[in-house]
Amino acid sequence: MTVSEPFGARLRRAMDDRGPLCVGIDPHASLLAEWGLNDDVTGLERFSRTVVEAMADRVAVLKPQSAFFERFGSRGVAVLEKSVEEARAAGALVVMDAKRGDIGSTMAAYAESFLHKDAPLFSDALTVSPYLGYGSLKPAVDLARENGAGLFVLALTSNPEGGEVQHAVRGDGRTVGATMLAHLAAENAGEEPLGSFGAVVGATLGDLSSYDLEINGPLLAPGIGAQGATPADLPGVFGAAVRNVVPNVSRGVLRHGPDVKALRAVAERFAAEIRAAVTAG
């Protein structure tokens, strides 16, 4: 699939057409077992192929977690490459959940791995960690722009430990998380209909009205389903920015496999509930 326009524009259209839902591809050992699969490359391949078959032609975004593929070595990465290729060919946008973060030439190499149009693992967007300083992400920002891709930067994550960094107050009175959001707003300034540089903001965090989430970019929101948040919670968490939220559901959908019809049915239900909540919000 060639990329002819920026990620933000493609994402906005996909969300409007297919509904604002991101389904994770998280083949961890316990989920493989629930599907009756072995915790090996064969099980990994069957799991991933089933999720792509069930979802890629109907959901806006698929988000493979690279760690669950990497643990099988080169054969697992080969499965990941095929999953990305097939998902994108079927029309889903792929967000690679790799949470890369480093400096200089190493960050540039991570960017080349996922954001260069000729890379085997080229994805529509990549999750990245800015906690070596937002400026350390520049190689990824630049390559994403060059190749029509996007980034999702960890800003206000749903894990309890995240607060000790993200809610820490800087010398200028802003929290670290708010600083990351401000950087992203600057990246997206003037972009229409949506910027390509988004934030990861947990749907389980409750009232975030003290943060300016209107960054003119997408907000990837983990926490719907197994982690306890519901689609109805989204307007209260995200406020005026709720239309740009991409809620991620992983186990809440995947536990209904390996039956393709069951996977599709539950994904369609989540998508409808999310659309209704976002519209009401």
Image (tube, rainbow, N blue to C red):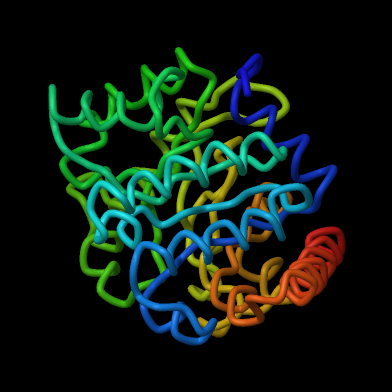
**Image quarter (top left, top right, bottom left or bottom right) of the C terminus:** bottom right
Residue at 66% of width from left, 31% of height from top?
A: 194
Q: Residue 138: x and y, percent?
A: 28, 24
**Quadrant in the rendering for residue 107:** top left
In the displayed structure, would residue 213 be above or below residue 192?
A: below
Q: Residue 54: x and y, percent?
A: 71, 60
Q: Residue 206: x and y, percent?
A: 54, 75
Q: Residue furthest front?
A: 42
In the displayed structure, would residue 140 be above or below residue 268?
A: above
131 left or right, relative to 205: left
Q: Nearer the viewer, residue 143 or 233?
A: 143
Q: Nearer the viewer, residue 92 or 201?
A: 92
**Image quarter (top left, top right, bottom left or bottom right) of the N terminus:** top right
Q: Nearer the viewer, residue 153 or 84?
A: 84
In the displayed structure, would residue 11 be above or below residue 244?
A: above
Q: Exactly how many numbered labels are in the figure?
A: 0
Q: Nearer the viewer, residue 172 or 167?
A: 167
